[in-house]
Image (cartoon, rainbow, N blue to C red):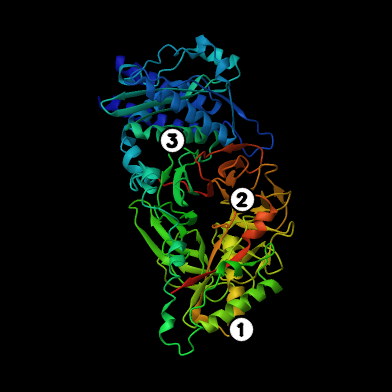
Amino acid sequence: MKKSWFIFLFALLLVGVSAEFLRAKVYIDIRSPSFRKFPIAITPFKSPLTPNEDMKLGERVTDILSNDLSISGFFALIDPKSFGESIVKPPPGVSPLPAEQRPAGTLPDFGEFRSWANIGAEALVMGEIAYKDRSLTMEARLYDVVQRELIIGKRYIGEITDLSRMAHRFADEIVFALTGEQGFFQTKIVFVSKATGNKEIYVMDFDGRNVNQITRHQSICLSPRFSPDGTKVAFTSYKSGNPDIYIKNLPNGEERPISQYPGLNISPAWSPDSQRLALTLSKDGNPEIYIVNQDGSGLLRLTDNPAIDVSPAWSPDGKKIAFVSNRQGNPQIYIMDADGKNVQRLTFEGNYNTHPAWSPRGDRIAFDSAIGGGRNICTIHRDGSDFRILTANLGRCEMPSWSPDGRNLVFSSNRDGGPHIFLIDAEGTRIKKLTFQRGGDIYPNWSPRFKEK
Amino acid sequence: MLKKSSVWLVVLISIMSIAFIATGCAKKQVVKEEAAAKPVVEAKKEEPKPTPAAPAPRVEAAPPAPTPRVEAAPPAPTPPAPAPRVEAAPPAPTPRVEAAPPAPTPEPIDLVSLRIQFAFDDYSLSTKSKENLEKLAAWMSKNSREKIQIEGHTCDIGTNEYNLALGERRANSAKKYLEALGVGSARVSTISYGEERPLVPNKEEAERSKNRRDEFVKTR
């Protein structure tokens, strides 16, 4: 008996080791110059036990997954129209819940895989939803069609309101399993909307779903920015009659003013360690950049120039701050050390460049510019080289903010009224509208990845 | 015997699976089935996560958002901040009390007509603007109890944050000029609204130029 237990343990160990090997396999080398989009088929999730057909739980999951994977830019989604009837049928052995009643990780037979390979799929996503006793269960699997094997299988259990989270989570799993990179599908975007008639702060999922209003100041709220630890939002509000800076603690909803000097208290920007904020104050006579601790103490002035200095943005290593200044005649992006020394002009193209955002990778800075007519989102290398215009003929595009992986940006554009919030990849090839509210949505700011506990 | 052979079998399978891991072959399935089975277990551990774990959903749950737009509408009859200031105007009549010189009391003034305009991305005062400020300064010196706030505004070109700074500079330009004309700085406050409170919708250049302005509002 002892011996057999030992062997069992040994076998388990092997499984563990091989699982590590599997993790290490990268299906899509997204850094390779010969990178091509990975063809993947996402089958409609089944929700056989849904009590209410209107909920269309399976459809919603399929939508979210497809949208996430398509936004990532790594995948070519195979058109469901090409699936054909036989293909959509659950492969033999893939039974609806409960899974306890079938062999763990049951695989479709080889014949099924061949039909998926025939329509060009290299990976396949399948799954089911069940809703019972107020408990929502989602099972999802990712298969390697070429190797005919299961890559990941997950079961998520929660409440019905967790549905989109489960879907985003599995999308993150897919991206990580196939590329080795962290996805960003569970992130949020904070923004300003005038949907109520007043400019208030809202938070939504990165894909535009689950919009929630988080301020009710009935005044003007501007410039919301997520702390890099994801727990707070700093913003400007005219609530007390003057533009002051507030911090809202997201877990408990508490809100406190941290900067209420006479004149402007605007454009808060978190330091990478979430401990300090760079901001713009005009208390000394003209808009200058200062640093303050997040409790409002330790005010330190960085710039000293008779011109406008505004809109600071930290480099991810915390050593530099980009900002806007019109000290040479019109607004341009400048970079200085985080102590205010070594100010250098970054942008020379165009006569109106504002709203810098430093890429999480540290290499590039995005901003909005009058270059190219109207306003456009541009990026430039931090050394001033490799200037790129991402948007063209998309209306007035302003206020860029990077995704946590530095591969995408959100910004506001009035291309179809609005303005609304749009997402674009860092190469400027794919664009997607995220918000549809009335009244106008501006100032998008992308959250960090939230830490799983 | 039976036991022994089964032992060998397991070892054999294990070795084979190691061999295949490197090449990635069908045998992996055996392994992965386990891996697939595991996540199910893991996932159970994850169960609580969807609710308590991620800070994000909580967040949204906290500021209860169920009927935001509806709620917000009723209590906010009008734009909150600036409106009260306008109402503050009437109290002026008080100066009447002291004045021995009877007539030059709270002279009415049309502050709207004194509004001053600016060029794009500029906060310097034109000749016309200076004339208006001189009229305003004269009125303020005659009505020494009056206080005003200068509101700096911009058109919608450019980004809000820069425009807030620009509006501040516009308000300050006017304030400095009034001070140079002898108006005490305590009687003049400033606020910038950037592009947040346009006079007219920013449709064409004609409208935009109207929005690049300073407005004067009586305060207490």
- Secondary structure state at the residue bearing disc 3: helix
The image's mark for residue B180 is 1
Q: Earlier in the sequence, mark 2 or mark 3?
A: 3
Q: Which residue position is annotated with label 2?
A: A398
Same chain? Circles 2 and 1 = no
Q: Residue furthest bottom?
A: B100
Q: Examine the image and state in which quarter residue A362 appears.
A: bottom right
* Residue B198 rendering spot, x and y as whole percentages: 57, 57
- Secondary structure state at the residue bearing disc 1: helix
Q: Identity of the amino acid at label 1?
A: Ala
Name above or below for residue A268 compared with residue A419.
below
Q: Is residue A267 visible?
A: yes
Q: Chain of mark 3?
A: A
Image position of B126 (left or right of B137): right
Image depth: mark 1 or mark 3 in front: 1
- Label 3 crowd bin: few (<14), some (14–19), many (20+), radius 10 Å: some
* Residue B126 rendering spot, x and y as whole percentages: 70, 72
Q: Are marks 2 and 3 in contact (CB under 8 Å)?
A: no
Which part of the image, by quadrant, shows the N terminus of chain A? top left
Same chain? Circles 1 and 3 = no
Q: Which residue position is annotated with label 3?
A: A169
* Residue A95 rendering spot, x and y as whole percentages: 37, 15
User: What separation in Å lies between label 1 and label 3 (alpha carbons)?
Assistant: 63 Å
Which part of the image, by quadrant, shows the C terminus of chain A? top left
Q: Chain of mark 2?
A: A
Name above or below for residue B215 compared with residue A138.
below
Q: Examine the image and state in which quarter residue B4 appears.
A: top left
